[in-house]
Image: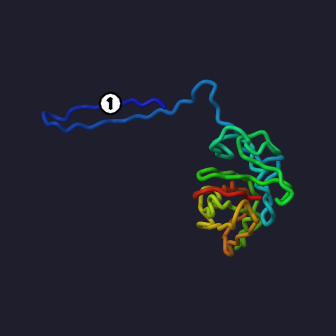
Amino acid sequence: MDVNLRCRTLSKSLLFTCFIVVFFLVAPGHVRAAQTPYGGNAWTVPGTIEVENFDEGGEGVSFHDLTVTNEGGAYRNTAVDIYASTNAGNGYYVVLEQGEWLEFTVNIEQTALYEMSVHGTVTSTYPSAEIHVFVDGLDVAGTISIQGGPGFGPWYEWLVPAVVLKAGQHVMKLELRLTWGSIT
């Protein structure tokens, strides 16, 4: 970003005005990656979205993760922490920490009132978490508070009974706002 600041004095008073012109320049060699659905197809809603299949695009585009490597070491070569598990949907689960998020390209078949469910767990170290779901930047589900039991697991399902979604292709964002948890 290049900022050009020009000021001029008004008569003999101490008042002055400033004209600020901001230029946004693309730094050579720095092009934002395109966001595309993982596997090439948007998720169909209604349906099930597997969280390990978040969009392609990289850090800050299709996901945000606080670490630079996949600490679970499973499934995909990204910074998102994906773990293998026989107890998780599709054999994998994702661990999210506070402030981390994932995005998914979705194709919503019709404008309607939907029931949304989140399948996940939290640990005894951090026994609760707050998840938010955004569609095109709008929080569509409010705060989804998840509570867990002792240790890691068991897996629970939290229902959000009345979510209005508009037909068409959209970007859905799943963000953890408080503590951390695992989602399948």
The residue drawn where x is 79% and y is 47% is 38
Q: Is residue 122 left or right of residue 44?
A: left
Q: Quadrant of residue 85?
A: bottom right
Amino acid type assigned to the residue bearing label 1 in the image: Arg
| On screen, residue 61 above or below 26 | below
Please tell me which residue lies in front, 19 or 49.
49
- On the image, the x and y values in percent for residue 164 come to 66, 70
Q: Residues within 10 Å of mark 1 (few under 14, many from 20)?
A: few
- On the image, the x and y values in percent for residue 42 come to 79, 53
- On the image, the x and y values in percent for residue 28 come to 60, 24
Label 1 sits on a secondary structure element that is strand
Q: Quadrant of residue 141?
A: bottom right
| On screen, residue 169 above or below 114 | above
**Number of numbered markers:** 1
Outermost residue on the top side: it is: 28
Q: Which residue is mark 1?
A: 6
- On the image, the x and y values in percent for residue 9 come to 21, 32
Please tell me which residue lies in front, 15 or 182.
182
Quarter of the image for the C terminus: give it.
bottom right
The residue drawn where x is 83% and y is 47% is 39
Q: Is residue 143 left or right of residue 3?
A: right
The residue drawn where x is 76% and y is 65% is 155
The residue drawn where x is 19% and y is 35% is 10
Please tell me which residue lies in front, 148 or 120.
148
Q: How is the image coloured?
A: rainbow
